[in-house]
Image (cartoon, rainbow, N blue to C red):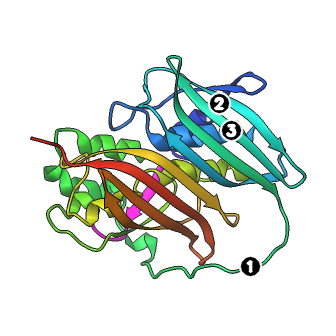
Amino acid sequence: MSAALDSLLDLLDLEQIERDIFRGTSRSAVVPRVFGGQVAAQALVAAGRTVPADRAAHSLHSYFLRMGDPGAPIVYSVDRIRDGRSFTTRRVVAVQHGQPIFHLSASFQTYEEGLEHQAAMPPAPDPETLPTAAQMLPRYADRFSGPGVVDRLIEARAAVDLRYVDAPPFGSVGEPREPRSQVWFRTNGKLADDPLLHVCMATYVSDMTLLDSVLLAHGRGGWAVGDVVGASLDHAMWFHRPFRADEWLLYDQESPSASGGRGLGQARIHTQDGRLAITVIQEGVVRVPRD
């Protein structure tokens, strides 16, 4: 296991203060705010720790309310709003400096048999043939808005092996193209078998690239290039089938719409053998800076 992955696992191992109250810290981020995937993953950890082990997370719906302060702890308060025979529902509020910064609702279900079908996995190259972040990012150093951005990006993604299938937005500035983006990802090291850990790790990664397809449609490079200002607004995920976050997952993303200073991204995550594991939808602020 890499040191970066070990650090991320420590980040997700929340401190329990009371029966339904947990506290988490933040890691250094590329920008001076808490990474959205971190707070979403930590909130799901908090929810999952109040649920029986035989009930797996099957969906989450969340809103990012305020920018998080990476220098302050985050307190997660869990509301046990439903414990049914098959389903368990939890509501989590993340608080900093006395104000809510994030809200999540998550649902868990006992395993049961049912009807089966799924969308087919799209074509994609073998992830082992694609460059790693450490190999790819330095190629675009001249595109970024300031010194040290490449190093901060590589450090932020050190726990996860994330590989772009095509050029990322910052590699296609000024060249609008189809609003689709694909990345392969897995953790940089093996994880324990706890299904909640794998779901939380996928939640963490899911916020890294989902709005890329919005940028691609307009030839924009993103915050690191300085041609847009962005932030996540809401995030929803449905977990369809078991998967491992330490094995290759294909994140196939597209944007059906952008308007009103907002962009929508939707995606499917498949295992390498073609099983549809997760569906993701996110809306974010995507604003062009004014002179």
* 192 vs 27, nearest the viewer: 27
Kind of residue at disc 2: Leu
Give the CA separation, mark 1 to mark 2. 35 Å
Kind of residue at disc 3: Arg
Give yes or no for residue 126 being in the magenta stretch: no
Q: Are marks 3 and 1 in contact (CB under 8 Å)?
A: no
Mark 3 residue crowding within 10 angstroms, few (<14) / some (14–19) / many (20+)? many
The disc, 3 or 1, on the residue closer to the chain's N-terminal end is 3
Is disc 1 placed on a helix, strand or loop?
loop
13 left or right, relative to 188: right
Look at discs 1 and 2 and give the one toward the viewer.
1
Mark 2 residue crowding within 10 angstroms, few (<14) / some (14–19) / many (20+)? many
Quadrant assignment for the C terminus: top left
The disc, 1 or 2, on the residue closer to the chain's N-terminal end is 2
Can residue 115 be seen in the rendering of this structure? yes
Q: Which residue is mark 1?
A: 116
Q: Which of the numbered marks, if any, corresponds to residue 20? A: none
Q: Which residue is mark 2?
A: 14
- On screen, residue 243 above or below 73: below
Q: Which residue is mark 3?
A: 91
Q: Residue at x 61, y 32 (%)?
A: 93
Kind of residue at disc 1: Glu
Give the CA separation, mark 3 to mark 1. 29 Å
Q: Which residues are magenta?
A: 159-167
Residue furthest to the top: 97
Q: Residue at x 41, y 47 (%)?
A: 157
Q: Where does residue 169 sit, x and y in percent of width and height? A: 26, 60
* 267 vs 138, nearest the viewer: 267
Give yes or no for residue 165 being in the magenta stretch: yes
195 left or right, relative to 213: right
